[in-house]
Structures are given as C-alpha cells and as structure tokens.
Image (cartoon, coloured by chain):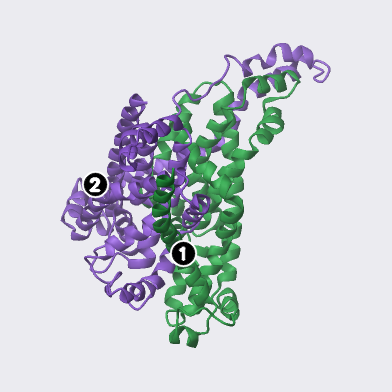
C-alpha cells in the first residue's frame, strides 16, 4: 500500500509539471495583454503590479474585434440552432419511425461524416459562387450546417435509440401526430443530448477558421478567428494589443469550458463508447 | 458504428389511419379530413429528414463527386477542358506536394507517441494519483481552444527570445529556433497540436477505463505485478477498442485540423517544410487560383483518408473480436 502511494507521488510530480505547461501559455498571454508596450519590451515575464485594461479596449474597438465578435455571434447562434433543429428532426425519424429508405439515409450520413472539409472545399466554393452564397452570412451559415450536420444527426439518432419505443407509442395512442410526438416527447427527452451536441457544434463553429476564410472575402464579414489572424500583421509591433485580441476570442470558449465541461466530455465520448 | 440503425417496431406510423382514426373521430369531422391526416402522417418521416438530406446531399456528397471531376480538367487557359491525369502528374512533380506527403508519413510515425501520452496519463488518473481530479480537468482545457488561438499564443511562447527558450536557457539548452529552422518546425507544430488535443483523447481513454473490470487490476496488484507489466498485460488488452478509436480519431485530427496552426504559425514555411495536404489545397485554391490542381490534391487526401477509414474498420473489427 505504501509502495503504491509512493509511486503515485512519483507520477504526480511530472503530471503537475504538465498541468502547469497546459495553463501557463494562456496565463502568460493574459499577463502580456495587461502590460503597456514599454513594460512588455522591458520585461515580458514579470507579473504586473497594475493591469492596463486599455489594451483590451484598443483591440475591441480600434482593431475591429467588436465587429468580428458580433459576426461570429450571429453566425454561430443561427448555425447551431439550425443544426439542433434539423439534426433532432432527422435523428427522430431515423431512430423511431419506420419508412422506406431510412437505412440508406443513415448510411449516407455516416459516409458524409468521413468526408473531411478539405476534400470538398474547392467544389463547394464553386457551388457557393454559382449560387451567389459566397461572402454572405446565409452562405457561411449553410456551410457550417452542412459541415456538422452528419455528426449532429448521428449523435441524435444514437441518443433517440435509447428512448423506449413504448413512450413513443403511448404518446401516439394519446392522439399525438408524428409532429406532436417530436415536439412533446422527443425534444424534452432529448434535452441532455441536444445540450452536449449543441456545445460541441458551438465550439466547432466558433473555432473554425478554414471555412470562414474560404467563404467570406470582405473585411467586415470576418469572423472572430479570421479577425485574430489578421491582427498579427496589423499589430506586429504592439504585442500587448495582439494578446488582448487573442484573449477576447478565447474568453467565450473558456466560459464554456468552465461551466459546461461535463457536457463536452459526454459529447466527445458518445462516439467512442456507443460506436 | 451503429449496425442496425432505425430500431423501430414494424408499422409504427402506418397504423396512423387505423385505431387512431376512430379515437379521433370527434376531432376530425369528415372522412376526407382523416384521410388527409393519415397521408400527412405517412409523409411525416420524409418531411422530418428532408432538410438534412438535401443539405448533406447538396453541400457534402455532390461536391465530392464534382471535385473528383474537376481534378481531371484544366486550370486557367484550359479551364473546363479534360486533361486526363495532368494534374496528378503535376502534383507528383511538385516538391511542395511531395513535402506535404512526406509530412503525412511523419505524422503516421508520430502517431503512437500522440496516442501513448494521453493513454499513459489516463492510466495514472484512473489509478488515482494524488490530484487526479485537478489533472483531469486542467488537461482538458486546451481542447476547447481554436487552433488560431493556440497558434497565436504559441507564436509568443516559441519566439526566439520567448518564454520557452528562456526557460531552456536557464538549464543550459538552446536557444532553439522553433519556428525558423526547417528541420525543427514540423516537430514544433505537431507538438503544439498534441498540446492542444491530448485532453480530448484523455477523456475518451477515461471513458474506456470506466468500462474496465477493476477486479482484473486488483488481481494484478495482488500478484505484485509492476506498473509496466499491468499496463502491458491488463490495460492494453482490455482497452483495445478504445485504443483503436483514439488511434483513428487522432490520425484524422492530424490530417484535417492542423490548418489553423499552419496558417497562423508557419504559413507552410520555413522553406515549405511544414506543408500538409490540407494547406497545399488551400494555397492552390485561395492563393494560386488553381482550383483543378487543388481538386486533384483533395482527391489524393480523400484516398489517404479512405485508407485511414478502412484501417479503422479493420482495427475495430479485430479489437471487437478480442473483447
């Protein structure tokens, strides 16, 4: 027993060092963001005695992060709402209704799951240009929905498969139409899955840079992540402002991490244990 | 994979017109009304799946076919003309694309390391080393960050006069030009990618551990087996399914989600040493205006992914048999 505890500590020391290495880069960035340019040049490591919040203000307004933030918020909110709506509708039909072609459709979703965006991005850009969707908000939203719909349908289908058929039958005997069952049974009972899939979809959309770069050309349509990449050139000699911009873009996902960690873990592991 | 997808009872919605109709006669006054209701019930599943099917077909599967077609046509002056395998021959000749493929090989070689790190950490957390709860949640934190943010942060951390070189300097190592030395930079980027994603794999491993029969571990402990022997003889065989899953998802992650890091940290440099197929596709499409050539590269990437996918099926099947 004692031997085991000792070996536990032997492992815990490097693990603690790794934990430090996990957190330190962000702490360092936050610390830099609060320095004046002069303080940064003199000593970038020293913890500050008085934080300078004005860098955040500069990044927010002068560097255009406010605009990019609003763009991201709009696009991500609408995309995730659509993903959850369409994903739960299809998941319900594929798991709990019997109809011709349902197996084909499910396999089609699975196939789409294994087609990465890089493989279709050139023709997708062509299709979007032909239909006038390029450089528009609906275009980016549609691209996001298309990208993560197979995943969302897959997870919603496997979640709804765990809801007993008796509940669906009972609701139908009570006189509900199929749509009534969807609204009154599948949505309420699907809430935990909708929450964890919704969080993952939010992270995917919020963190994306490739799809946004490909579909949005004009500067005022930039999403937050594209905005961060443009900051670097703009503020290459003003690292504190650059770090502030990075911090602004990181705060929303850090909130999600702090408060919804469990749900993220549930979503991530759903594919591994149920698969 | 869900083998049997729609677990439905025979004829569930088909009954709609039957017993329901009599029950609901009060609500639906006329016969035509109930017939219309029955029809709408019969169509309901299609209405529910239609939007998802249309979007997936139109914006995922159709572009895939379109892209393969593009790859056999020309760019620029030869736009739209069928050029056979010219694009693929050009790819084979392009040193940048060759570097990209070489780097894919490097990723395959580094894959065991990228899987072993979270696997080992998960083992210690499962064995409840002191502080395991804290480790578990701290390790997961970079996994929520965008590659753009991670790349930006590490641009600061890995600068020639940055924190990492300073720390190494105090113990007499370096300085290393993490982002400027062609022999080092690809390893740097992979390292940062692992830093950012090992938390995800860790969570998957821990979910696998939760299904592990703990009496096996206890028995190994009683027999006085060393930790290494326990891992080799008990943990790895019992977790073969989870390990296969993590291997495949990690490989897919390395092939498809490093764009953000490359874009922010290296732009493919120095000297083109950090190209990956996805970055090559982006450059040919977005910067060089060579969509047909980019499509050919996409098709090659798709074939690589297909091999990974088939390997996955094989691995999972073998792992499943051992369970």
Q: Is residue A228 above or below residue A106?
A: below
**Marks 1/2 same chain:** yes
Query: Few, some or many C-alpha atoms within 10 Å of disc 1 (few <14, some 14-19, many ≥20)?
Result: many
Where is residue A110 drawn, in percent x and y? 43, 34
Query: Few, some or many C-alpha atoms within 10 Å of disc 2 (few <14, some 14-19, many ≥20)?
Result: some
* Residue that carries the numbered disc 1 in the rendered image: B149
Q: Distance from label 1 to label 2 (Cα)?
A: 42 Å
* Residue that appears at 35% across and 43% down: B66
As drawn, the chain in purple is B
Asked whether, in this view, residue B102 is left or right of residue A145, the answer is left
Q: Secondary structure at mark 2?
A: loop
Front: mark 1 or 2: 1
Dividing the image into 4 quarters, which one contains the N terminus of chain B? top left
Q: Is residue A62 above or below residue A169?
A: below
* Residue that appears at 37% across and 52% down: A122
* Residue that appears at 47% across and 73% down: A231
Where is residue A157 drawn, in percent x and y? 54, 32
The hue used for chain A is green
Q: Is residue B278 above or below residue B210?
A: below
* Residue that carries the numbered disc 2 in the rendered image: B82
Point out which mark residue A111 bears.
none
């Amino acid at each position: 027993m004692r031997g085991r505890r000792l070996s536990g500590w032997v492992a815990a020391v490097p693990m603690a060092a790794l934990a430090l290495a996990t957190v330190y880069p962000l702490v360092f960035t936050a610390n830099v963001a609060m320095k004046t340019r002069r303080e940064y040049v003199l000593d970038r490591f020293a913890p500050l005695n008085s934080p300078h919040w004005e860098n955040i203000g500069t990044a927010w307004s002068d560097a255009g992060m406010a605009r990019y933030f609003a763009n991201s918020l709009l696009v991500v909110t609408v995309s995730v709402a659509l993903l959850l709506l369409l994903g739960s509708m299809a998941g319900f039909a594929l798991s709990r209704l019997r109809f011709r072609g349902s197996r084909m459709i499910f396999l089609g979703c699975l196939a789409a799951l294994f087609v990465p965006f890089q493989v279709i991005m050139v023709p997708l850009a062509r299709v979007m240009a032909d239909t006038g969707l390029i450089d528009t908000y609906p275009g980016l939203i549609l691209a996001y929905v298309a990208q993560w719909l197979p995943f969302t349908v897959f997870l919603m289908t496997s979640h709804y498969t765990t809801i007993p058929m008796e509940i669906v039958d009972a609701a139908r005997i009570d006189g509900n139409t199929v749509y009534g069952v969807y609204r009154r049974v599948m949505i309420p009972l699907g809430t935990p899955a909708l929450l964890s899939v919704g969080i993952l979809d939010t992270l995917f959309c919020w963190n994306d840079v490739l799809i946004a770069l490909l579909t949005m050309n004009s500067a005022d349509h930039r999403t937050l992540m594209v905005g961060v990449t443009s900051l670097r050139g703009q503020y290459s000699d003003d690292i504190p402002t650059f770090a502030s911009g990075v911090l602004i873009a990181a705060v929303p996902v850090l909130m999600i991490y702090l408060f919804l960690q469990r749900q993220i873990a549930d979503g991530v592991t759903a594919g591994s244990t149920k698969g | 994979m869900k083998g049997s997808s729609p677990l439905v009872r025979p004829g569930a919605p088909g009954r709609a017109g039957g017993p329901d109709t009599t029950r609901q006669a009060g609500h639906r006054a006329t016969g035509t009304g109930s017939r219309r209701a029955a029809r709408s019930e019969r169509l309901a599943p299609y209405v529910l799946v239609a939007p998802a099917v249309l979007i997936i077909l139109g914006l995922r599967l159709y572009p895939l076919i379109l892209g393969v077609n593009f790859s056999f046509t020309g760019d620029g002056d030869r736009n739209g003309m069928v050029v056979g395998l010219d694009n693929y021959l050009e790819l084979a000749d392009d040193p940048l694309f060759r570097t990209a493929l070489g780097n894919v090989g490097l990723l395959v070689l580094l894959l065991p390391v990228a899987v072993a790190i979270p696997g080992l950490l998960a083992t210690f957390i499962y064995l409840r080393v002191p502080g395991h709860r804290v480790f578990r949640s701290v390790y997961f934190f970079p996994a929520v960050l965008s590659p753009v943010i991670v790349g930006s942060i590490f641009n600061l951390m890995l600068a020639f006069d940055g924190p990492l070189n300073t720390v190494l300097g105090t113990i007499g190592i370096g300085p290393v030009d993490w982002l400027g030395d062609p022999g080092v930079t690809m390893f740097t980027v992979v390292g940062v990618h692992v830093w950012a994603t090992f938390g995800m794999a860790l969570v998957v491993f821990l979910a696998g551990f939760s299904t592990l029969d703990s009496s096996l571990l206890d028995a190994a402990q009683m027999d006085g087996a060393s930790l290494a022997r326990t891992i080799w003889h008990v943990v790895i065989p019992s977790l073969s399914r989870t390990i296969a899953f993590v291997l495949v998802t990690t490989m897919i992650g390395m092939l498809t989600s490093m764009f953000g890091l490359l874009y922010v940290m290296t732009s493919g440099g120095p000297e083109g040493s950090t190209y990956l197929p996805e970055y090559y596709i982006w450059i040919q499409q977005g910067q060089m205006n060579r969509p047909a050539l980019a499509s050919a590269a996409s098709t090659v990437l798709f074939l690589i992914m297909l091999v990974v996918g088939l390997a996955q099926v094989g691995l999972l099947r073998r792992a499943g048999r051992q369970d």
